[in-house]
Amino acid sequence: MKKFFSDNGIWILAAAAAIAVALCIISAVSSGTGFLHNAAGVVASPFRSAGAAVTNWVIGIGDHFEDVDSLQAENDELRRQVAELEEQLHQAQTDKEENARLRQLLGLHEQHSDFVYETALITERSSSNWSSSMTLNKGTRSGVAIGNCVVDAQGYLVGVVAEAGANWCRVNSLLDTGAQFGAFVFRSGKTAVTSGDLELMNHGKLKLIYLSDHPDLINGDLIVTSGLGGFYPSGLVIASVEELRTDDSGLSRYAVLQPKTDLTSLTEVFIITDFNTVT
Amino acid sequence: MTRRAIALKWLLYALTAAVAVLLQNLILTPLHIGGIHPFLLPAAAVIPATREARGQSLLFAFTFGLLCDLTMPASFPCLYAAAFSLSALLSGIVARRLINPGAICSVAASTAALIVTDLLQLLSMAGSGTTDVLTGLVLTLHELAVSVVFFFPVHFLDYWVYRRTLSE
Protein backbone atom coordinates (compact mmCIF):
# COMPACT_ATOMS: atom_id res chain seq x y z
CA MET A 1 0.00 0.00 0.00
CA LYS A 2 2.81 2.35 0.99
CA LYS A 3 4.62 1.45 -2.24
CA PHE A 4 1.44 2.15 -4.17
CA PHE A 5 1.23 5.66 -2.72
CA SER A 6 4.93 6.40 -3.20
CA ASP A 7 4.83 5.15 -6.81
CA ASN A 8 1.55 6.79 -7.70
CA GLY A 9 1.63 9.89 -5.47
CA ILE A 10 2.03 12.24 -8.42
CA TRP A 11 -0.92 10.62 -10.21
CA ILE A 12 -3.07 10.94 -7.08
CA LEU A 13 -2.12 14.61 -6.93
CA ALA A 14 -2.94 15.03 -10.63
CA ALA A 15 -6.30 13.28 -10.15
CA ALA A 16 -7.07 15.45 -7.12
CA ALA A 17 -6.19 18.58 -9.07
CA ALA A 18 -8.38 17.42 -11.99
CA ILE A 19 -11.32 16.80 -9.64
CA ALA A 20 -10.78 20.22 -8.03
CA VAL A 21 -10.70 21.95 -11.42
CA ALA A 22 -13.79 20.02 -12.58
CA LEU A 23 -15.68 21.01 -9.43
CA CYS A 24 -14.57 24.63 -9.86
CA ILE A 25 -15.89 24.64 -13.44
CA ILE A 26 -19.16 22.91 -12.47
CA SER A 27 -19.69 25.39 -9.61
CA ALA A 28 -18.84 28.34 -11.82
CA VAL A 29 -21.16 27.42 -14.70
CA SER A 30 -24.09 26.11 -12.67
CA SER A 31 -26.58 28.64 -11.37
CA GLY A 32 -28.03 28.29 -7.86
CA THR A 33 -26.97 25.58 -5.45
CA GLY A 34 -25.14 22.63 -7.05
CA PHE A 35 -26.05 19.00 -6.49
CA LEU A 36 -22.95 18.25 -4.41
CA HIS A 37 -23.50 21.30 -2.18
CA ASN A 38 -27.14 20.37 -1.75
CA ALA A 39 -26.36 16.73 -0.93
CA ALA A 40 -23.59 17.71 1.52
CA GLY A 41 -25.94 20.19 3.16
CA VAL A 42 -28.72 17.62 3.52
CA VAL A 43 -26.31 15.08 5.05
CA ALA A 44 -24.78 17.68 7.37
CA SER A 45 -28.14 19.13 8.42
CA PRO A 46 -28.87 16.71 11.32
CA PHE A 47 -25.32 17.18 12.63
CA ARG A 48 -25.71 20.96 12.45
CA SER A 49 -29.00 20.72 14.34
CA ALA A 50 -27.38 18.50 16.97
CA GLY A 51 -24.44 20.91 17.24
CA ALA A 52 -26.80 23.87 17.64
CA ALA A 53 -28.75 21.99 20.32
CA VAL A 54 -25.52 21.24 22.25
CA THR A 55 -24.36 24.87 21.96
CA ASN A 56 -27.73 26.19 23.14
CA TRP A 57 -27.69 23.69 26.02
CA VAL A 58 -24.22 24.86 27.10
CA ILE A 59 -25.33 28.50 26.85
CA GLY A 60 -28.45 27.57 28.88
CA ILE A 61 -26.31 26.12 31.68
CA GLY A 62 -24.23 29.32 31.72
CA ASP A 63 -27.39 31.41 31.96
CA HIS A 64 -28.66 29.26 34.83
CA PHE A 65 -25.68 30.26 36.93
CA GLU A 66 -26.21 33.99 36.40
CA ASP A 67 -25.33 36.11 39.36
CA VAL A 68 -28.35 36.57 41.69
CA ASP A 69 -27.51 40.22 42.32
CA SER A 70 -27.53 41.03 38.63
CA LEU A 71 -30.89 39.27 38.30
CA GLN A 72 -32.27 41.33 41.19
CA ALA A 73 -31.03 44.53 39.58
CA GLU A 74 -32.50 43.44 36.26
CA ASN A 75 -35.81 42.72 37.97
CA ASP A 76 -35.92 46.23 39.47
CA GLU A 77 -35.07 47.72 36.08
CA LEU A 78 -37.81 45.66 34.44
CA ARG A 79 -40.39 46.83 37.00
CA ARG A 80 -39.47 50.42 36.21
CA GLN A 81 -39.72 49.71 32.48
CA VAL A 82 -43.14 48.07 32.93
CA ALA A 83 -44.42 51.23 34.58
CA GLU A 84 -43.04 53.33 31.71
CA LEU A 85 -44.43 50.97 29.11
CA GLU A 86 -47.90 51.07 30.65
CA GLU A 87 -47.83 54.81 30.28
CA GLN A 88 -46.56 54.52 26.70
CA LEU A 89 -49.24 51.94 25.92
CA HIS A 90 -51.91 54.41 26.85
CA GLN A 91 -50.30 56.99 24.55
CA ALA A 92 -49.83 54.38 21.80
CA GLN A 93 -53.52 53.51 21.85
CA THR A 94 -54.35 57.13 21.05
CA ASP A 95 -51.61 57.27 18.40
CA LYS A 96 -52.84 54.03 16.82
CA GLU A 97 -56.31 55.42 16.37
CA GLU A 98 -54.89 58.58 14.84
CA ASN A 99 -52.56 56.48 12.62
CA ALA A 100 -55.48 54.39 11.39
CA ARG A 101 -57.38 57.54 10.48
CA LEU A 102 -54.38 58.94 8.59
CA ARG A 103 -53.79 55.62 6.78
CA GLN A 104 -57.38 55.65 5.71
CA LEU A 105 -56.94 59.18 4.42
CA LEU A 106 -53.78 58.25 2.47
CA GLY A 107 -55.03 54.86 1.29
CA LEU A 108 -51.95 53.06 2.64
CA HIS A 109 -51.75 49.39 3.60
CA GLU A 110 -50.76 48.15 7.04
CA GLN A 111 -46.92 48.14 7.16
CA HIS A 112 -45.45 44.85 5.84
CA SER A 113 -48.82 43.11 5.77
CA ASP A 114 -47.81 41.66 2.38
CA PHE A 115 -44.84 39.72 3.79
CA VAL A 116 -44.96 35.92 3.92
CA TYR A 117 -42.68 34.66 6.70
CA GLU A 118 -41.02 31.27 7.23
CA THR A 119 -39.63 30.71 10.73
CA ALA A 120 -36.17 29.12 10.87
CA LEU A 121 -33.54 28.18 13.43
CA ILE A 122 -29.85 28.95 13.06
CA THR A 123 -28.03 25.60 13.03
CA GLU A 124 -24.50 26.76 12.24
CA ARG A 125 -22.47 29.95 12.05
CA SER A 126 -19.60 30.44 9.63
CA SER A 127 -16.29 29.36 11.15
CA SER A 128 -14.33 31.55 8.74
CA ASN A 129 -13.19 35.04 9.68
CA TRP A 130 -13.46 36.04 6.01
CA SER A 131 -17.21 35.82 5.74
CA SER A 132 -20.22 36.36 7.93
CA SER A 133 -22.88 33.77 7.24
CA MET A 134 -25.14 31.29 8.98
CA THR A 135 -26.94 28.09 8.05
CA LEU A 136 -30.69 27.78 8.72
CA ASN A 137 -32.84 24.65 9.00
CA LYS A 138 -35.28 25.60 6.22
CA GLY A 139 -34.80 25.20 2.48
CA THR A 140 -36.52 24.98 -0.88
CA ARG A 141 -39.04 22.48 0.51
CA SER A 142 -40.37 25.30 2.71
CA GLY A 143 -40.46 27.77 -0.16
CA VAL A 144 -37.11 29.41 0.61
CA ALA A 145 -35.23 30.75 -2.43
CA ILE A 146 -31.94 32.50 -3.12
CA GLY A 147 -32.35 36.25 -2.58
CA ASN A 148 -34.97 36.00 0.19
CA CYS A 149 -34.42 38.52 2.98
CA VAL A 150 -34.06 37.30 6.56
CA VAL A 151 -35.17 39.37 9.56
CA ASP A 152 -35.18 38.93 13.33
CA ALA A 153 -38.17 38.98 15.69
CA GLN A 154 -38.17 42.81 15.73
CA GLY A 155 -38.18 42.95 11.93
CA TYR A 156 -34.58 44.16 11.70
CA LEU A 157 -32.70 42.93 8.64
CA VAL A 158 -30.33 40.01 9.32
CA GLY A 159 -29.17 39.11 5.80
CA VAL A 160 -30.06 37.49 2.53
CA VAL A 161 -30.28 33.83 1.43
CA ALA A 162 -27.21 33.05 -0.68
CA GLU A 163 -27.63 29.28 -1.12
CA ALA A 164 -30.68 27.08 -0.70
CA GLY A 165 -30.78 23.29 -0.40
CA ALA A 166 -33.72 20.98 0.20
CA ASN A 167 -33.86 21.38 4.00
CA TRP A 168 -31.21 24.03 4.63
CA CYS A 169 -30.14 27.43 3.41
CA ARG A 170 -27.10 29.64 3.89
CA VAL A 171 -27.63 33.29 4.72
CA ASN A 172 -25.02 35.95 4.08
CA SER A 173 -25.42 38.39 6.96
CA LEU A 174 -25.59 42.11 6.21
CA LEU A 175 -21.97 42.33 7.46
CA ASP A 176 -20.63 39.96 4.78
CA THR A 177 -18.51 41.55 2.05
CA GLY A 178 -20.77 39.98 -0.58
CA ALA A 179 -23.98 41.48 0.81
CA GLN A 180 -25.18 44.83 -0.58
CA PHE A 181 -28.58 46.43 -0.12
CA GLY A 182 -30.14 49.45 -1.76
CA ALA A 183 -31.03 51.73 1.14
CA PHE A 184 -32.25 55.16 2.08
CA VAL A 185 -31.83 57.40 5.08
CA PHE A 186 -35.17 57.34 6.86
CA ARG A 187 -34.97 60.98 8.02
CA SER A 188 -33.85 62.64 4.79
CA GLY A 189 -34.97 60.06 2.20
CA LYS A 190 -31.55 60.15 0.46
CA THR A 191 -30.59 56.90 -1.25
CA ALA A 192 -27.29 54.99 -0.86
CA VAL A 193 -26.05 51.39 -0.64
CA THR A 194 -25.09 49.40 2.46
CA SER A 195 -22.13 47.11 2.00
CA GLY A 196 -20.15 44.69 4.15
CA ASP A 197 -16.50 45.52 4.75
CA LEU A 198 -13.81 43.05 5.83
CA GLU A 199 -12.27 45.44 8.36
CA LEU A 200 -15.61 46.50 9.88
CA MET A 201 -17.15 43.01 9.70
CA ASN A 202 -15.07 41.67 12.55
CA HIS A 203 -16.20 44.58 14.70
CA GLY A 204 -19.84 43.82 13.92
CA LYS A 205 -20.33 46.88 11.67
CA LEU A 206 -20.90 47.70 8.00
CA LYS A 207 -20.74 50.78 5.80
CA LEU A 208 -22.99 53.03 3.77
CA ILE A 209 -21.48 53.90 0.39
CA TYR A 210 -22.29 55.96 -2.72
CA LEU A 211 -23.11 58.99 -0.60
CA SER A 212 -23.61 62.39 -2.20
CA ASP A 213 -20.94 65.11 -1.89
CA HIS A 214 -22.75 66.66 1.05
CA PRO A 215 -24.38 63.74 2.81
CA ASP A 216 -27.07 64.92 5.16
CA LEU A 217 -26.30 62.40 7.91
CA ILE A 218 -26.29 62.63 11.68
CA ASN A 219 -25.40 60.04 14.29
CA GLY A 220 -28.30 57.71 14.95
CA ASP A 221 -29.95 58.22 11.54
CA LEU A 222 -31.93 55.11 10.68
CA ILE A 223 -31.05 53.31 7.43
CA VAL A 224 -33.77 51.16 5.82
CA THR A 225 -33.99 49.11 2.62
CA SER A 226 -35.16 51.12 -0.38
CA GLY A 227 -36.79 48.22 -2.24
CA LEU A 228 -35.75 49.85 -5.53
CA GLY A 229 -35.43 47.29 -8.30
CA GLY A 230 -37.84 44.94 -6.58
CA PHE A 231 -35.18 42.48 -5.39
CA TYR A 232 -35.71 43.15 -1.70
CA PRO A 233 -38.69 44.48 0.27
CA SER A 234 -38.66 48.16 1.18
CA GLY A 235 -38.71 49.58 4.69
CA LEU A 236 -36.70 46.88 6.48
CA VAL A 237 -34.60 48.51 9.19
CA ILE A 238 -30.90 47.80 8.55
CA ALA A 239 -28.77 49.90 10.86
CA SER A 240 -28.13 53.30 12.39
CA VAL A 241 -25.38 55.75 11.47
CA GLU A 242 -22.41 55.75 13.84
CA GLU A 243 -19.87 58.02 12.14
CA LEU A 244 -18.91 59.55 8.83
CA ARG A 245 -15.48 58.79 7.33
CA THR A 246 -13.47 59.68 4.24
CA ASP A 247 -12.01 56.72 2.33
CA ASP A 248 -8.26 56.15 1.83
CA SER A 249 -8.23 57.90 -1.54
CA GLY A 250 -9.75 61.00 0.06
CA LEU A 251 -12.22 61.29 -2.82
CA SER A 252 -15.38 59.86 -1.35
CA ARG A 253 -17.05 59.48 2.00
CA TYR A 254 -18.80 56.62 3.66
CA ALA A 255 -20.73 56.15 6.89
CA VAL A 256 -19.99 53.44 9.45
CA LEU A 257 -23.23 51.73 10.46
CA GLN A 258 -24.18 49.79 13.57
CA PRO A 259 -26.69 47.03 12.67
CA LYS A 260 -29.94 47.14 14.62
CA THR A 261 -30.00 43.36 14.96
CA ASP A 262 -27.66 41.57 17.36
CA LEU A 263 -26.19 38.84 15.15
CA THR A 264 -24.29 37.13 17.97
CA SER A 265 -27.32 36.35 20.10
CA LEU A 266 -29.76 35.28 17.38
CA THR A 267 -31.13 31.73 17.49
CA GLU A 268 -34.38 32.11 15.55
CA VAL A 269 -35.01 34.20 12.43
CA PHE A 270 -37.77 34.79 9.86
CA ILE A 271 -37.28 34.36 6.12
CA ILE A 272 -39.43 36.62 3.93
CA THR A 273 -40.42 34.22 1.16
CA ASP A 274 -42.83 36.59 -0.61
CA PHE A 275 -43.72 40.29 -0.68
CA ASN A 276 -45.33 42.88 -2.93
CA THR A 277 -42.76 44.77 -4.98
CA VAL A 278 -42.65 48.58 -4.94
CA THR A 279 -44.26 50.01 -8.07
CA MET B 1 2.16 -1.98 7.56
CA THR B 2 -0.87 -3.95 6.42
CA ARG B 3 -3.68 -2.45 4.38
CA ARG B 4 -6.00 -2.83 7.38
CA ALA B 5 -3.56 -0.99 9.66
CA ILE B 6 -3.25 1.87 7.16
CA ALA B 7 -7.05 2.14 6.91
CA LEU B 8 -7.36 2.15 10.73
CA LYS B 9 -4.69 4.82 11.02
CA TRP B 10 -6.44 7.19 8.59
CA LEU B 11 -9.78 6.49 10.21
CA LEU B 12 -8.27 7.67 13.51
CA TYR B 13 -6.82 10.76 11.81
CA ALA B 14 -10.28 11.44 10.37
CA LEU B 15 -11.74 11.16 13.88
CA THR B 16 -9.21 13.67 15.22
CA ALA B 17 -10.17 16.00 12.37
CA ALA B 18 -13.83 15.55 13.36
CA VAL B 19 -12.92 16.46 16.95
CA ALA B 20 -11.17 19.58 15.62
CA VAL B 21 -14.31 20.50 13.62
CA LEU B 22 -16.46 20.06 16.76
CA LEU B 23 -14.03 22.15 18.80
CA GLN B 24 -14.10 24.81 16.09
CA ASN B 25 -17.89 24.99 15.79
CA LEU B 26 -18.92 24.57 19.43
CA ILE B 27 -16.22 26.49 21.27
CA LEU B 28 -13.90 28.51 19.04
CA THR B 29 -16.35 30.11 16.58
CA PRO B 30 -18.37 31.84 19.35
CA LEU B 31 -15.08 32.85 21.03
CA HIS B 32 -14.07 36.28 19.72
CA ILE B 33 -10.65 37.68 20.54
CA GLY B 34 -10.50 41.27 19.27
CA GLY B 35 -13.33 40.45 16.86
CA ILE B 36 -11.58 37.39 15.42
CA HIS B 37 -12.04 33.75 16.35
CA PRO B 38 -9.32 31.07 16.17
CA PHE B 39 -9.34 28.89 13.03
CA LEU B 40 -8.22 25.29 13.54
CA LEU B 41 -9.20 23.49 10.36
CA PRO B 42 -5.92 24.03 8.42
CA ALA B 43 -4.04 22.46 11.35
CA ALA B 44 -6.33 19.42 11.36
CA ALA B 45 -5.70 18.99 7.64
CA VAL B 46 -1.91 19.24 7.52
CA ILE B 47 -0.41 18.00 10.80
CA PRO B 48 -0.61 14.31 9.73
CA ALA B 49 1.47 15.26 6.67
CA THR B 50 4.48 16.01 8.90
CA ARG B 51 4.84 12.31 9.84
CA GLU B 52 2.98 10.25 7.28
CA ALA B 53 3.64 9.23 3.67
CA ARG B 54 3.27 12.03 1.13
CA GLY B 55 0.61 10.42 -1.08
CA GLN B 56 -1.63 9.32 1.78
CA SER B 57 -1.46 12.62 3.65
CA LEU B 58 -2.07 14.53 0.42
CA LEU B 59 -5.21 12.49 -0.22
CA PHE B 60 -6.34 13.07 3.39
CA ALA B 61 -5.81 16.84 3.16
CA PHE B 62 -7.57 17.01 -0.21
CA THR B 63 -10.59 14.99 1.02
CA PHE B 64 -10.87 17.05 4.21
CA GLY B 65 -10.62 20.26 2.17
CA LEU B 66 -13.29 19.04 -0.24
CA LEU B 67 -15.66 18.32 2.67
CA CYS B 68 -14.98 21.83 4.02
CA ASP B 69 -15.73 23.28 0.58
CA LEU B 70 -19.03 21.44 0.43
CA THR B 71 -20.19 22.53 3.88
CA MET B 72 -18.62 25.96 4.39
CA PRO B 73 -18.80 29.24 2.46
CA ALA B 74 -15.63 30.27 0.63
CA SER B 75 -14.61 33.06 -1.71
CA PHE B 76 -14.20 30.58 -4.59
CA PRO B 77 -15.08 26.89 -5.18
CA CYS B 78 -12.51 24.34 -3.97
CA LEU B 79 -10.61 26.93 -1.89
CA TYR B 80 -10.06 24.56 1.01
CA ALA B 81 -9.28 21.52 -1.18
CA ALA B 82 -6.63 23.51 -3.04
CA ALA B 83 -5.22 25.24 0.05
CA PHE B 84 -5.04 22.13 2.23
CA SER B 85 -3.49 19.98 -0.55
CA LEU B 86 -0.84 22.59 -1.25
CA SER B 87 -0.19 23.03 2.47
CA ALA B 88 0.10 19.25 3.04
CA LEU B 89 2.72 19.12 0.30
CA LEU B 90 4.58 22.04 1.93
CA SER B 91 4.30 20.47 5.39
CA GLY B 92 5.86 17.24 4.14
CA ILE B 93 8.80 19.19 2.71
CA VAL B 94 9.21 21.19 5.95
CA ALA B 95 9.18 18.00 8.05
CA ARG B 96 11.65 16.17 5.84
CA ARG B 97 14.12 18.98 5.15
CA LEU B 98 13.81 21.75 7.76
CA ILE B 99 12.31 20.80 11.13
CA ASN B 100 12.11 17.33 12.66
CA PRO B 101 8.50 16.17 13.21
CA GLY B 102 7.24 17.31 16.60
CA ALA B 103 5.24 20.09 18.20
CA ILE B 104 7.31 22.89 16.62
CA CYS B 105 7.08 21.29 13.20
CA SER B 106 3.30 20.85 13.58
CA VAL B 107 2.87 24.50 14.55
CA ALA B 108 5.07 25.59 11.62
CA ALA B 109 3.06 23.42 9.21
CA SER B 110 -0.25 24.68 10.61
CA THR B 111 0.97 28.28 10.38
CA ALA B 112 1.93 27.73 6.74
CA ALA B 113 -1.45 26.13 6.05
CA LEU B 114 -3.36 29.01 7.63
CA ILE B 115 -1.32 31.55 5.67
CA VAL B 116 -1.79 29.67 2.38
CA THR B 117 -5.56 29.41 2.98
CA ASP B 118 -5.85 33.09 3.87
CA LEU B 119 -3.65 34.25 0.99
CA LEU B 120 -5.72 32.30 -1.54
CA GLN B 121 -8.85 33.80 0.00
CA LEU B 122 -7.29 37.27 -0.07
CA LEU B 123 -6.19 36.94 -3.71
CA SER B 124 -9.69 35.96 -4.71
CA MET B 125 -11.37 38.75 -2.73
CA ALA B 126 -8.86 41.43 -3.76
CA GLY B 127 -9.23 40.28 -7.38
CA SER B 128 -12.98 40.75 -7.22
CA GLY B 129 -12.56 44.13 -5.52
CA THR B 130 -14.40 43.22 -2.30
CA THR B 131 -11.44 44.04 -0.08
CA ASP B 132 -7.98 45.57 -0.20
CA VAL B 133 -4.74 43.66 0.28
CA LEU B 134 -3.60 45.48 3.43
CA THR B 135 -6.86 44.79 5.29
CA GLY B 136 -6.57 41.13 4.29
CA LEU B 137 -2.96 40.87 5.45
CA VAL B 138 -3.83 42.41 8.82
CA LEU B 139 -6.69 39.93 9.19
CA THR B 140 -4.34 37.04 8.32
CA LEU B 141 -1.83 38.08 10.99
CA HIS B 142 -4.58 38.66 13.55
CA GLU B 143 -6.11 35.26 12.80
CA LEU B 144 -2.73 33.58 13.08
CA ALA B 145 -2.03 35.28 16.43
CA VAL B 146 -5.27 34.07 18.00
CA SER B 147 -5.09 30.58 16.45
CA VAL B 148 -1.51 29.50 17.07
CA VAL B 149 -2.01 28.37 20.68
CA PHE B 150 -4.87 26.09 19.59
CA PHE B 151 -2.63 24.21 17.12
CA PHE B 152 -1.04 22.35 20.05
CA PRO B 153 -4.13 20.31 21.08
CA VAL B 154 -4.51 19.18 17.45
CA HIS B 155 -0.83 18.23 17.37
CA PHE B 156 -1.16 16.13 20.53
CA LEU B 157 -4.27 14.38 19.21
CA ASP B 158 -2.51 13.54 15.93
CA TYR B 159 0.65 12.52 17.78
CA TRP B 160 -1.45 10.11 19.87
CA VAL B 161 -2.78 8.55 16.66
CA TYR B 162 0.77 8.30 15.27
CA ARG B 163 2.08 6.56 18.42
CA ARG B 164 -0.99 4.35 18.64
CA THR B 165 -0.64 3.13 15.05
CA LEU B 166 3.16 3.02 14.88
CA SER B 167 3.43 -0.40 16.52
CA GLU B 168 0.86 -2.06 14.25
Image (spheres, rainbow, N blue to C red):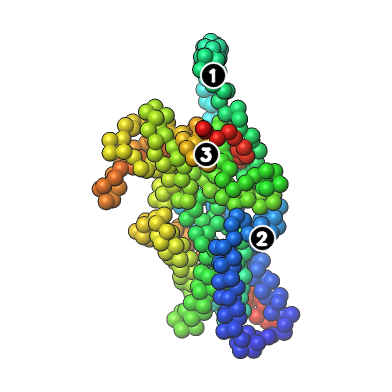
Q: Earlier in the sequence, mark 3 or mark 1?
A: 1
Rounded to the nearest angstrom, the CA distance separating label 3 from label 2 is 28 Å
- Asked if residue A53 lies left or right of residue B44, the reply is right
Query: Do the residues at discs 3 and 1 belong to one chain?
Result: yes
Residue A129 x/y as whole percent: 48, 55
Question: According to the image, label 1 marks what residue?
Answer: A107
Give the class, few, some or many, for how many residues have Cα within 10 Å of label 3's Cα (few <14, many ≥20).
few
For the residues labelled 2 and 1, the Cα–Cα distance comes to 47 Å
Are discs 3 and 2 both within one chain? Answer: yes
Find out whether the residues at labels 3 and 1 contact each other: C-beta distance under 8 Å. Answer: no
Report the residue at 62% width, 46% height from top: A145
Image position of B108 with respect to B100: above or below: above
Q: Would residue B52 be seen by someone viewing this image from the given angle? A: no
Q: What residue lies at 59% left-to-right and 71% top-to-bottom?
A: A22
Instruction: Estimate how packed mark 2 is, as few (under 14), some (14 to 19) or many (20 or more) residues with alpha carbons within 10 Å.
Output: few
- x%, y% of residue B154? 57, 66
Crowd band around label 1 with a 10 angstrom C-alpha radius: few (<14), some (14–19), many (20+): few
Q: Residue at x 37, y 33 (%)?
A: A190
